[in-house]
Each structure stands twice: as C-alpha cells, then as structure tokens.
Amino acid sequence: MAGLVVRNVARADRAVVDAFAELGVATVHEAQGRTGALASSITPIYRGAHVAGSAVTVSVPPADNWMVHVAVEECRDGDVLVVAPTAPSDAGYFGELLATALQARGVRGLVIDAGCRDVAELERMRFPVWSKCVSPVGTVKETLGDVNVRVACAGQSVEPGDVVVADDDGVVVVPRKRAAEVLAACRAREEKEARSRARYAAGELSLDVHGMRAELERKGLRYVDEGPR
Amino acid sequence: MAGLVVRNVARADRAVVDAFAELGVATVHEAQGRTGALASSITPIYRGAHVAGSAVTVSVPPADNWMVHVAVEECRDGDVLVVAPTAPSDAGYFGELLATALQARGVRGLVIDAGCRDVAELERMRFPVWSKCVSPVGTVKETLGDVNVRVACAGQSVEPGDVVVADDDGVVVVPRKRAAEVLAACRAREEKEARSRARYAAGELSLDVHGMRAELERKGLRYVDEGPR
Amino acid sequence: MAGLVVRNVARADRAVVDAFAELGVATVHEAQGRTGALASSITPIYRGAHVAGSAVTVSVPPADNWMVHVAVEECRDGDVLVVAPTAPSDAGYFGELLATALQARGVRGLVIDAGCRDVAELERMRFPVWSKCVSPVGTVKETLGDVNVRVACAGQSVEPGDVVVADDDGVVVVPRKRAAEVLAACRAREEKEARSRARYAAGELSLDVHGMRAELERKGLRYVDEGPR
Amino acid sequence: MAGLVVRNVARADRAVVDAFAELGVATVHEAQGRTGALASSITPIYRGAHVAGSAVTVSVPPADNWMVHVAVEECRDGDVLVVAPTAPSDAGYFGELLATALQARGVRGLVIDAGCRDVAELERMRFPVWSKCVSPVGTVKETLGDVNVRVACAGQSVEPGDVVVADDDGVVVVPRKRAAEVLAACRAREEKEARSRARYAAGELSLDVHGMRAELERKGLRYVDEGPR
Amino acid sequence: MAGLVVRNVARADRAVVDAFAELGVATVHEAQGRTGALASSITPIYRGAHVAGSAVTVSVPPADNWMVHVAVEECRDGDVLVVAPTAPSDAGYFGELLATALQARGVRGLVIDAGCRDVAELERMRFPVWSKCVSPVGTVKETLGDVNVRVACAGQSVEPGDVVVADDDGVVVVPRKRAAEVLAACRAREEKEARSRARYAAGELSLDVHGMRAELERKGLRYVDEGPR
Amino acid sequence: MAGLVVRNVARADRAVVDAFAELGVATVHEAQGRTGALASSITPIYRGAHVAGSAVTVSVPPADNWMVHVAVEECRDGDVLVVAPTAPSDAGYFGELLATALQARGVRGLVIDAGCRDVAELERMRFPVWSKCVSPVGTVKETLGDVNVRVACAGQSVEPGDVVVADDDGVVVVPRKRAAEVLAACRAREEKEARSRARYAAGELSLDVHGMRAELERKGLRYVDEGPR
C-alpha cells in the first residue's frame, strides 16, 4: 500500500531554518528538552559539514532506491533529504550522481539510515551525508515506497517539513511547529554556556559555578583520602 | 519539554483488535504492504505468546522508568504497552512488579526497545514481553517523559491507539484507522496461503503454482548441468 | 550477470552424509582441523534439531527471495538448503510455505545468513532452520541470483554438494571430497573423548590425563598462595 | 608476563554464598546500589538455572583455553568459574568435557565473556553456563594466562572469591567482603517488594503506593485529554 | 589439516589489473552484476587510498598471525594481501613491520577481516589497509593456516589471483577469469554515468533521463498535495 | 551505595608517565605481555593525538554525568580521566565545556566507554578523547557514582593512578606499580623492532630474520605449486 508522494509540504520559516545552521546539534538537542537526536550509528561521511534544512522524507524498501529518484523532484532549495528503509539495510542507496541532481536543486545534504557510496567524490563536491555506513553495494529499482510521509529514522520520528540539523556530532530533528521556540531556547542556552565556559577556563569548578555541592552532599556524596595500597 | 500525558486516546474497535490475535505477525506485515514490522532486535522473552492490543505509548529517558509507572494508570483492558527510550538504552526498565500492576488492569503485554528483567517470573505469570534484551540492570526515577505521544520504537513510528500484534516472529504495528482494512487483507492472504500450502505439500512447485517460470526466463535465468569438478 | 542454476551437482556418498548426523558440530569442526564452522551469529530457531545433508546453495540479492523458490526444484531427499545474500540482509526470506515445499522433497533443513519467519509453525513442522535472525519482514521477487554456485555463508565458503552438519551449537561445512576422511577422524576423536570423559568424571584432571604440567612449567607457569587481602 | 596461578584464595562464608541462590540477580543488583551486573550480552545457554558461588577467575588469551584446564584444579565445591579473555573472542572455550571435570569437583556453573559449545549436552548434564555466544569453534592450548587474579568480565571487575549470582536475567557479582551486608539488603528489598506486589495485584497504582504524584507534578508533569485526530 | 602454501598462483593480466585502479569500487561492483563487494564492516584505515592488485590469500587462526609472515614470501609486485580468520577475531594481526616487508616487495595494500594496528605509521608510509577494526592487541605465532587457498573474507569468496579493488567506499573482488570482461563493462558504465551526470547537473531529473515515470505509474505511484496539518 | 570520592590517590612517577607518551599503544601492550588494551570499540575522536597520563577514574550511572563534574576537582596536571558507566550507555557524557575545565587543570585527555560530543570543538581545542561513540545526546545530573575507585572500562580493570597511554591505535593501561618495569620492556622492544624494520626494508623475510622456518616445518607446513585451475 506504499506508493504515495505528498507534494508541497509545509516547511518552517526559511530564516528560522537557516539560523539553525549556526547551532550545534548537541545544543539543539538540549534546548528542546533532550529529544530529537538520531542514533549515534548515524555519522557524517566527512568531518566539517554543518547544515540545517527542511526535511523531505523518503520511506524506501530494503536495498531499493527507486523512491530516492522520485523524491528528487519534490526537493527545493534549502531542503535536506531524509531516507529511512522500512526494514534495516546497509546497501549503498546514494552516490555522487544523485548528489549531483540534489545539489542542482539546492539541497543541503542527506540523512540516511542505510549506506551511501562514492564518499570521496561526495567530499570533493562538498555534498554532506550522514549515514549508517559506507557501502559500495548498489540497490535495485523495483518496489515503491513513499515520499513526504512520516518516517522513523534512526530512532526518531521525522515529519516532512521538520527542521533537520546535522554536524560532526550527528543529527537532530526539530518539529516544524516548534522551530522558532526551539531556536530561541538554543540562543539562551548558548549565552549561558558562554558564561560557564569563561569561568571554567579561568579555573572555576562546575561544582561551584552551578552550586552542586549541597545537593551532592544531600544525596550522600562522601570524600575520603586514599589509604595505603 | 517532556512531561505530557495524553488521556483517553482513541483505540480501534475492540472486535477488530481482538481478531488480530489470530493472525501471524508476518501475515499482518505482508497484508499491509510489507510495512510496520519492528526491527528483528526485538524478540519475545519466551516462546508461544501471541497477542494483539491497542498501543499505549511511553517515551522514556535512557535508564529511567518513571514514566512507565505513570503510564500504568492510562492503560485499559486490551491494551499493549509500547515503550521507547529517547536514546538507546539496554537497562532493565520492566519486571514482574510492573507486570503485576499491568495484568491487574487487563494489559496484554509489553513491547520495549530496551531491556526487561525478571523473565522467569514473567513467564510464570504469562505476561509476555518483546524486548531488545534481558538485563538485570535497574533504572532511576528522576526525569519526565511522555505518555501517549507518537514514538519511534525499533524502527517504526507508533501512535497511541495503533494496533500492536506480537508473536514468536516479532512485532508489527497497524495504524488505528487502517485496522479494519488490514484485517480484511490479512484474511484474504490467509486463504490464498492455505491454497498454496496444500499444493506445496502435494509436491507442486511454487514456480508452477505461481507461474514464475516465464518471468524468470525473461530476466535471463539459465540452467546448466554441472561439469566435472 | 547472476541468473545461473547448476543442476545435478555431485553429492557426497549418502551413507557418509547420513553418518554425520550422529556427530556433534563441534566434533566435526575439530576433526577437520578446526575449520568449517559458520559464524556464531547463525543460531537454530529451536533447540534439539540435529541434521546432516548435502548443500544446495543459493546466492540471493538482499531482501529478495525469488531464487529460493527456484532452488526448491533443485533439491533432493537428503539435502540441506544453504542461502547466502550477496549483501547483508536480515529480512525474513523463508517461512512455513517454503518449508512445506522443501519437506515434501525430503530436504532436512535450511541454513541462511539472513532472517526467517513463521518460527512457531516451523517448530511444529519440525523443519529446522539455522538463521541470523528471526524477522517477520518479507521479501520481493524481482532480481535473479544463482543456485548451486559457490557462496560465502557466514564466514565460510560453501560449495554445492558439501556436507552440512547442524545442531544446537551451530553449523559446520565439510568439503564433499573430504567427507569420508573427516568422518573417520570424527570417530577417532569421539573415542578419545569418551576415554577423557570417564577419567574426568572420576575426578582426574586434564592436566594429568593429557600430561600438560611439564609444558606449562616450561612456558613459565608459577603457583603462589594468596597473601592477605 | 602472564602465567600466575593464585591458590587458596579466600571465599565468602559458605552459608552466605548459598543464601544468594534464593535471590534473583535483579534483586541483588538493586540491593547493592545498582552495581555489579554483567553486560546483557551474557546470557544463559538454557533457561531455569539459578546458582550462587564463589568466583574462581581465569584470564585467558583470545581463542586459547589452556588456562581453563589449569583453573579446574583450583576449584572447590561451591565455586563458579569466571573466564575473561584479554581481548574479545567468541571462540567456544568450554564444552561438556570440561564441564564433566568441574561437576566432579562440585563447581556450580561457568560465566564466560566468550563462547561455549556442546550446549545440548550441557543442558542434559544440568551444568549451567552464562556466555557471550554459543560457538562450535575450538581453541588452542599454547599461551599462558592467569588464574585467580582480578579480571574485567563483561563490564565488571571480578576478584577471586567474590560471590557470583546467576539466573535467567543474567549475572551479578558481589564483592566478597560486602556479601553479608548485601544479603541483608536483598532480604529487606524482597520484603518490601512483596508488599508492593500485593497492592499492585489488588489494582493499586505505584503512583499512589509510593506517593509519586507530588514529585511528578513538581517536575512539571501535565495531563491533557486527547483532542480530535 | 591446515598448513598448505600454494606457490606461483596465476594472476590476471597485469595491464588489466592496473586498469582497475582507475575505477571506483562501486562502479566495479555494479559492472559485474552487483556482486563481489565485501561487507561494509571493512573500512580503510585512512581516506584517499585507491588500489587494485592480485589477491594473495591467507587463512589464519583467530588471534594468530604466523601465516601472514609465511605469506609475505609468496607476494609479488602488484599484489594485494587478503587475510581471513577461520573464526571471527578483532586482534591486530598487522602493523608497520609487516607493512615494511610487504612494501619492499611491491605489495599494494592489505585487506583483512580482523584488526590492524600502527595506523599512524601505516598512513605515513602510505601503505593502505582495509580492516574490520583498529586494535593494538597483538597475536601469537603458534598455529598453522594456509596461503593461497580459497577464503571467505567479509562475506565474499576470494580465490588467489582474483583482482581486488579497494577505495574509500570499501573493497570489491573480481574473479580472475572475468577480469577483462568486467573491466570493459566498467568502462561502458562510466561513460553512461558521465552522460547522466551532465544532465543531472543541468537540472534534469533521473525520472526523465531514464524514463521511469511510466513504470512508476504502472506500479501504482500516486501524487497528492498536502492537506492541512 | 555509590557516592565515594577518593582523594589524593598515588600516581606513578611523573618522568615515567611522561616517557610513555613517546611509545605506541601497541608497543606498550606487547611489552607488558600482551595485556591491558581496551576494546577496539574505543576509538579517538580525531587522529594524531598521543598522550600518557595518570588515571583518575570515574564510575558513572548510565546517561548521568554528574560524577564527571565531581571528578574534575580531583584531577591534576598530567592526569587522564577514565570514565566507565555501571551499565552500557552511548549518551554524550562529555563536551567542550567539561574539556575547558579539564584543560585548565592540565588534564591530557579523556577515555570513556560511552559517548562524547562537541567533537569539532574538541579537535579545535586539541583536547583528545577516546570514546565508544560520538553522540549529541545529553545526560542528567541526578544519581551518584564514584571517583577514584577501580572500574572496568572497555574490557580492562583500571585502578586510579594507573598509567593510561592512548594514540590512534587505541588505549592501553599499565598498572601503576609496574610502570617503570614496563617502560624498560618497551624500550627494549623498540630497539629490537628497529633492527627488524631495517632488515625487512632491505627485503629480508621475517621467516629468516626470526628463524621461523624450522618450527613451521616441524608443525607440518608444506609448499605446493599450483596445479591447473
């Protein structure tokens, strides 16, 4: 009963989306209440990329990338493609040809809970991919899936139009309707962290900066000096 | 921003839910277009259980089972509890005490993308659990999560009120609104399989029963006799 | 360039094949020089089965079981089907319908470096399967593979006609041409082990039964009594 | 610099050790402050065994079981053998011959962060093993290790003479000197759990039994009724 | 019964072998019918290497690298060493000393379904390795294996003399006798891909370039515009 | 019963500790009898770091990093922090804020059998981390653990004050009291390896340099020339 392509899905406000590209994935994850991070099995194929974009989602059968081709047409400038197989697969669904097509449309990157290939060429093109593995194994084009439906990708539900932020730490998803609110929370958090960082660099302890000692003692923390060993 | 409990979520029609308990998970997965199966990492703690129920979903922090306690109150007769951590965990979130509480409310089983414990006692109680692992490691009760929100559990999105079917093969989720339609498709599939089974048992080949030979030949299948080795 | 079915491959002498069903997989592995064991990721779907048979091999694409249907026709009484995907897959390639077809031809079991399903029914039928996982996830029938070519299955090369022995410990493969020689080595090993077992049961130590103490001392083994802790 | 066998290590009081065999692994883990549990990768080779004993520890090279033979001599009635490789291995270090030797000395079971084999025979003998995997792959006898030194086994440090408790949930280690104190804590916990169990079975909620509602509210838990979906 | 070294195995034509070094692993995998790729668990220890060579195969016991030393003598200029343990191992079989010896003989790289070490030095030497892991753990030299026999390496059968191609995407094996034919197929594929790439870069869609729309529609693909969310 | 901080633990002699920073992890592992290496799952977050230091150990609950904050105060110039969860966790316990605090105290790096985050910033700061994974997922600060007690970290027991050496190959632990002796053994090994390296580079075979041929022949190694294939 697959075979559905939903067109013209709502995206978050572009200025909001773009602002997330300045924010670390860990910060976004914290700022929205420690949620939305994809599993740590999803890693960047090269270091140094940092993108934010609107999710175009693709539900694909294992080892079949036909729907990724279908999805290209639904992508717009500023999007990030999010691909999730209906059952686990480590095939190489994606390579530099598809990246060429996506880059021509202004797509900012790919997140896939499966494999990708042509990683040397993708790095040269600066088309970033966050994937479960690198695999030269190709796929077939035989079976339908869906585009722009809700998918479960690496442990998180992703809706089309959600904001996807990805950097060297991994990937986090922000629900479209909460994007502005989360953005504000991120900025507040960054300011607070800047203050902590300065104090830590000066040698202060987080135990003191954040006043943790009383609570630690209340929970029973005790200090002893080492006896003879 | 976690900490939400949604009450009185809609369930599918009870007769429809109950009818799924007669259907194998593999059949349901096929009948709804080869979708909805949780990852094969989710296995039953004992063999022979087969349940269908309405999902009460729980989003929990890693290694913290407080929200499972909260969720008990939201469960009704005929439900199945579905627990998904916001980040991977193999702690033992669930044991025979919680099972006692759930069984007292008519809950039919637990699906959890994390660990459970007390498996010997759970088998004696006939309270079935499908989990990622068995682990004696306990959890804390410190941090909020959510009850009856959409969760991503072992590779599938699950909405509260979806129909969950589980047997020795694993777990499949049927969207609540499609439950009746999928049930009908399952029954049609079972009838078709019964006819195939009888012919296979009599020695007929699926190549002939399903008329595959022409298409195989068209794709290039060729037969040779073994030469000397 | 797949799509080859090799017919009428040579099998080992039937009496030799059958004799292996009395021998443990661990014994066979040792007797042929500690080789031939499939990876420990391959486990039986139920305990207590113990079979030996001639390998009919199947090379399948990921998540596509079409060639298993093709392979059924090539199976004879006394065979064991060995299925290896060309790239990793945990889809459920095999269930009770195919088992019905194989059982009708006298096939003794299945070894598959992928998933199988319908495990409750397979156990009821007493059709044993050794697989990488149990998964309800079905497969497509779109792409050719090969039957009775050499495959790499769970870490071992398997030729069609090789002897496959499987029990609760796992699976071992014996090259067809060495089958008689390995059988003899197994029997010699079993006699030796019976003698050791009797002496161990009587309280003798393997250090003495096998005269290990001198070599251990030569390599530097030293004994101390525990001091105060 | 391996090659050390420490003899006559201190064990905990036998009555204390034996009393642990009545206590679930999960209970012991909780009672000693949620510590001591081996990783969930360590599972019993058959269900229903439940033992407690004093650890005889063995540090072995990968794929070499020579030191297990050496360790047999150091075992006494009431011991449990704990085997940890110096580097990961899934070879089958242990089978029914060694079990015969250990059973003749009154050893109660084996815990090994590697593979074991002959599992059908081990179950018939009722010699329980908790292992990382089942593997027919044998080992060599070439390289020394140590007996009764501290080992890191599946995520826990184990000292010779520590109390090892194992059941269907896994394995927990209790430091020898804390054994009596932990035993008392276990019993107190069991009494408390019995009271909870009775109330849960009568339909009371843990939220009420343990007075969790106020703290949940304080942390911000909020309840809403489902709107239209 | 191990202990066999086969000398002077046939290699593919040197010009053909060398030509593969210009071809991506993914291309070769596709061009030979989507076969021959090693599992994605095999990754390069550093990025940017790209080699093709003739396989010298080594079957080694777990955690024992003696036969790698034996194999050095069998290597010639233009070879790639392929090492497969008879049972899984993540020990560090290989480091810069062996690389020095191989480099002195003109060997182009190592493929090993186990661990390697000294990776910083190996990168400085520009001796590329594709391995399952990096591990400082050393091996022993006690037990025989085989050189230049067929091995199963990371999911593929490899014969001595087969062509091995490796780059950042992984490793693919081409049967020696098919090398020239596969080379031609690769070149044809590359030309076709160059044409696609140019059209994609110009903004054309693969749906149109490859005429997929009709078949997608025939299989039931349907487009809808998003309703209100 | 957690909640203990041991202060002022003994470190090894500083000159000895510092000298280890010149030695490869693989060399240290070999020189102390092929022991002490952490599992290969522990990898550096960036290449090129090489440190030696005295272990400050931290035992943490899963997904809770409170005790890392406590541990900062116990760190001195020249230390390496070693963090081990009491149960498996891949949460991101550690990021650039804690690194700032540690760097201000002269700490040389972190070894953690769990996740870390902010890896781009950590690399810019040149604060090296060896971790099980990179994960943006944050932790809570709710539950006590211990500082400077013995921990089991990635397969090795680590005592506070042990010497930790880490480079691109991984991590090795040297017991504090054996540090000087192991250092001497390392230097002897390095000299021996330098001699081997020179001979290998000149084309000599290890079979000859180390006189292995006789022992190989005694064990049964045999050479054959390839027949026709």
Image (spheres, coloured by chain):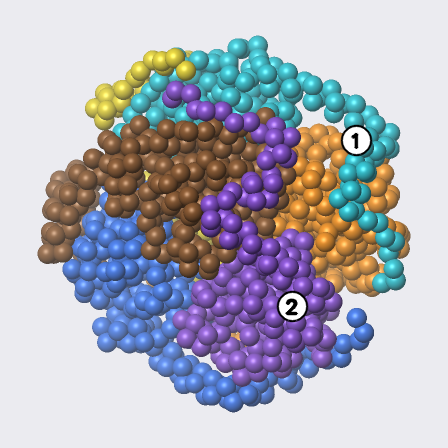
Chain colours: A cyan, B brown, C blue, D purple, E yellow, F orange
Badge number at residue A210: 1
The percent position of residue F178, horizontal first and vertical second, equals: 81, 63
Front position in the image: F102 or E56: F102
Asked whether disc 1 touches disc 2, contact meaning CB atoms under 8 Å apart, the reply is: no
Disc 1 crowd rating (10 Å Cα; few below 14, some 14-19, many 20+) is few
Quarter of the rendering occupied by the C terminus of chain A: bottom right
Residue at 68% across / 82% down in the picture? C217
Quarter of the rendering occupied by the N terminus of chain A: top left
Residue at 40% across / 38% down in the picture? B76
Vertically, is C224 above or below C156? below
Residue at 75% across / 79% down in the picture? C224
Identify the image quadrant of residue A24: top right
Identify the image quadrant of residue E207: top left
Q: Is residue C55 visible?
A: yes
Is disc 1 placed on a helix, strand or loop? loop
Badge number at residue D163: 2
Q: Is residue C181 left or right of residue F52?
A: left
Disc 2 crowd rating (10 Å Cα; few below 14, some 14-19, many 20+) is many
- Kind of residue indicated by mark 1: His
Badge number at residue E25: none
